[in-house]
Amino acid sequence: MAVNEVAYDVDGWGTGTVWFADCVMVWHELPYPRPDSSSGGAPQPTTHCESIVSKRTSVGPDGDKSVTFDPQVVVRLGRYFHGEAVGFEDVEIDLDWCTAFQRSVAHTLRGVPYGEVVTYGELAALAGYPNAQRAAGTFCAHNRLPLVIPCHRVVSADGLGSYGSLGEGYKRRLLALEGVRF
């Protein structure tokens, strides 16, 4: 199976990367300013808009090097980061690694509409696992497919909640794109 790694730049956000295997999204890293060696390692703003900046293909076991991703998904990611209300519900994703609980949480979270939020407790209950809010939080913390499984739309009962290594500021900024203020 061929795996495609696609990097994309978004003005004001940075460079993101998406991995596809046979047109199925298997991993996504949100755009973030990357260090530039000419500035002593300080993050630099990007200047490209909705552009695919690189694509690497690894050869599958049968020697297949075919393109296995839909470039429109990458274009949609760029449109999202420019404030357009786009959805990703139709993007095929890999959930083979998930337990039944994780799969239920992922499917439930994909149904949380653009511009709306749920608490970790509400997410767990909607997924059919009342009182599993901590486990829902753990799933969100290990989410491989942000935006497609929109964990930024999950907040704590008493505030914004965390957003991993990208931090609360990044989460707040994603929610602000969708018209949600925290």
Image: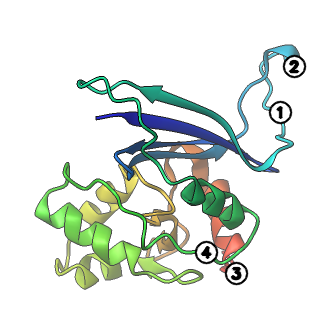
Which residue type carries mark 4? Val
Q: Looking at the image, do the residues carrying marks 1 and 2 touch, with CB atoms under 8 Å apart?
A: yes
Which residue type carries mark 1? Gln
Residue at image x 81%, y 50%?
A: 11
**Which residue in the protein does label 2 denote?**
39
Determine whether, in the image, residue 138 is placed left or right of residue 162. left
Residue at image x 17%, y 77%?
A: 129
- Quick one: SS at disc 2? helix
Residue 92, quarter of picture = bottom left
Q: Can you say whether 111 is above or below 10 in the image? A: below
Q: CA distance from mark 1 to mark 4?
A: 27 Å
**Which residue in the protein does label 4 denote?**
86
Q: CA distance from mark 1 to mark 3?
A: 27 Å
- Quick one: SS at disc 4? loop
* In the foreground, 109 or 164: 109
**Which residue in the protein does label 1 denote?**
44
> Which quarter of the figure is the C terminus placed in?
bottom right
Residue at image x 87%, y 19%?
A: 39
Mark 2 vs 4, N-terminal side: 2
Label annotation for residue 179 = 3
Q: Can you say whether 112 is above or below 88 in the image? A: below
Residue 76 at x, y percent in the picture: 62, 63
Q: Residues within 10 Å of mark 3 (few under 14, many from 20)?
A: some
Determine whether, in the image, residue 75 is placed left or right of residue 5. right
Determine whether, in the image, residue 84 is placed left or right of residue 95. right
- Quick one: SS at disc 3? loop
- Quick one: SS at disc 1? loop
Tag count: 4
Residue at image x 82%, y 45%?
A: 48
